[in-house]
Amino acid sequence: MILRILVAALLVAVHFLTGYGVLSLLKVKLKPVMHGMLSILLGVAVASILPFLLQLAYIPLTSATVFGTLVGVMLLLNIKVLLSKAKPTLSKSDFSIKMYEWPFVLILTFLVLISIWRCYTLPPTPRDLLSGPETIAEFAVREHSFINSVFGLSLESTNNQFKPPFLTCLQLIYKLAGFPFGQWWLSVIVTSFIIFMYNALKEIVHPILAGALLLFFMAAPEMYGYTFMALFDYANMVFLFLSCYFLFAYFRDKDKQKFYLATLLMAFAVYIRSETLVLAAMLVPAILFTQWQWKESIKQMAITVVIFMVSSFLLYYIPQTFYIKYYLPAQYDVSGLIRSDIFNLQPLWQRFKDMNSELMFSEYGRALWGYIIYVFTIFFVAELVFFKARFTVAARNWLYAVLVVYIGLPVLGFLLPLMDLEHTTKRGLMKILPLMVFYLAHNQILQKITAWLNTFENPAGRVPVSVARPKAQPVPETKKKKKKH
Amino acid sequence: MTATTPNKGRQRLLLAAAVLLAVLIYKMPGNTFWFQTKPFSYYQEFKAVKLSEMTDERMREARYGKHYILANMLVQTLAKDKDVTVLLEPNNYYRQKGIDMTVPEPIVFYYYTSGRMKAVWTNSKDVYKAKYLVRITPQLELAIVPLNSKEDIDKAVAEYKNYPATL
């Protein structure tokens, strides 16, 4: 047990340093806690690609090659950090928690610890995992290849062997590290994400409201289940959310490094669940609209969109088309999965209606997602009524992201009939929850409560550092002209 | 922007407000039910479990249940045979006959047995590789029927033709 904890700590350290290197290369700096958590998340994402790259090069997947590559890539990404004389500085205040934060912090910690415990002790159970990625990873440990004896079995009952290699790679790494059930990487993602979210929310709303919003988010029963049952959807939600977070930070700060980070995070989201490519495309109008407001040239707008979409497309194409076609012994006709009668829109309306009536606004919907969707709806309507729909720019951005998922899921279900309502669309709805939470944080009613709480806490009128809004970092005019993509 | 000296009295009031808000969220009917049936229940499980008893094999048996136990029972029973493939009855057959049983799909069966045995369904292209048919009676008794020829397999498949092999 102690050995496993040590190994786990070592793996987290490797993830952290890998992600830290990525952030250093992209020159993105955040508050220390958020920077650390984002580093870990990026590190896990990079790790989830490396065994796949080894497989593409037909390099046997052994402990030596897999961990050697992990460490090698970690070092390569940190060359700039190692050569740099600047050392990261931390202060006590970076980790300080105020007295009134403790109730929510303790409840959230309890929920996360229980989740970690279950993730560690229970074997993986979701059918989509067992009938594909998990079995491939299990036999890759013995046979040192993802193309192993599993493909010699009768596979008529499943197409999960063709799912993206994200889970297979992470399961392989953690199994090779001595975790028989693998899935402990999920706890790493969940913990880092919750800490990141809490700190990001604290930058926008008062910490009490941040805690309350996060508790509504964590108390979504269906989603909580997926914090200890490894599958694609939780990680996909995390990276889609992070991509939106940095895309909107780019819209706010006009800092192209954040755009590149958003692009990378979206590519990881697509790598985890290939159909996210459609959601990425649905974010393009927001990018174009913002750049049009900035009076960018058509050429510049085109370059931005191409960068955003091509990286996602590559992480869709390589695992889902190239790998399946040229590496796997069994073939998978993706085109056969697309609806043929796309001009008959009745199934689209039906899916949209069913998603709303069955999965969102119903007793079953409440059992799946707790109260977060209702809280979102109430505050959204209240802002429409009391503020005459005059949303802040940030709120509009998050509402747009909510709309992308809200419209995108039925569209995906329509285009790909295999994406059924009961399983795929249901799990896909997880993606909308953090987006709703961040709209809520920008809701003007909660902003007014935040202002009132801040004044109450500091009658002198000074804003405490922990709730200070992040400053926009406008790029100097001279720099702006040079900083074309 | 400057850090302020915290006003302890007001922070205590905010602490009371935070506790009240947390209790209010907890007391929302769906949340109370969820906390009690999931996280608190999981915590009770956590307290009750002894680390020494929590072997990987036990956790698999507890989590995968009948599927896992059946697959490994077959491995033990047919331990002397090498490279065994078994033909499993369709789950639709169990449903229609009211038999409280389901069988895993071939890939999951292979996973459960750690690659020591393969299974096929009646609709599998590899059905002729089967050496035994696994029958389960309504009393959940297990029978392993040898399949010695192609005719035996055809006969077994024909017996289940009205029961499509699905999950």
Image: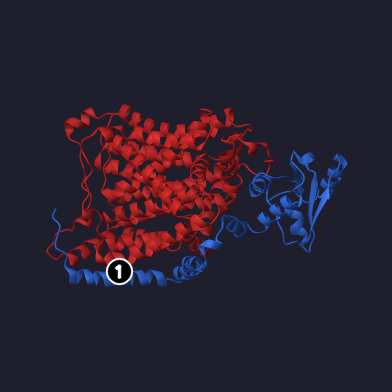
Chain colours: A red, B blue
Residue A377: tell me if it is visible. no
> What's the chain of the residue with tag 1?
B
Q: Position of residue A53 (x, y in %)?
A: 48, 32
Q: Quadrant of residue A152?
A: top right
Q: Amino acid at mark 1?
A: Ala
Q: Position of residue A429 (x, y in %)?
A: 48, 52
Write the residue at 47% across / 65% down. B39
Q: Nearer the viewer, residue A351 or A483?
A: A483
In the image, residue B91 sits, relative to residue A322, either above or below, namely below
In the image, residue A317 sits, relative to residue A209, either above or below, namely above
Write the residue at 64% across / 33% down. A330
**Drawn side of residue B146 relative to residue B30, left or right:** right
Q: Nearer the viewer, residue A455 or A385?
A: A455
**Drawn side of residue A214 relative to residue A63, left or right:** left
Q: Quadrant of residue A157?
A: top right
Please rate how many residues cluster around mark 1, counting C-alpha atoms within 10 Å: few if below 14, some from 14 to 19, many from 20.
Answer: many
Q: Position of residue B141 (x, y in %)?
A: 78, 60
Q: Which residue is mark 1?
A: B18
**Drawn side of residue A181 relative to residue A193, left or right:** right
* Number of marks: 1
Write the residue at 52% across / 36% down. A62
Q: Nearer the viewer, residue A75 or A99?
A: A75
Q: Element type at marker 1? A: helix
Residue B6: tell me if it is visible. yes
**Drawn side of residue A289 relative to residue A267, left or right:** left
Q: Position of residue A392 (x, y in %)?
A: 27, 51
In the image, residue A332 sits, relative to residue B160, either above or below, namely above
Write the residue at 28% across / 56% down. A202
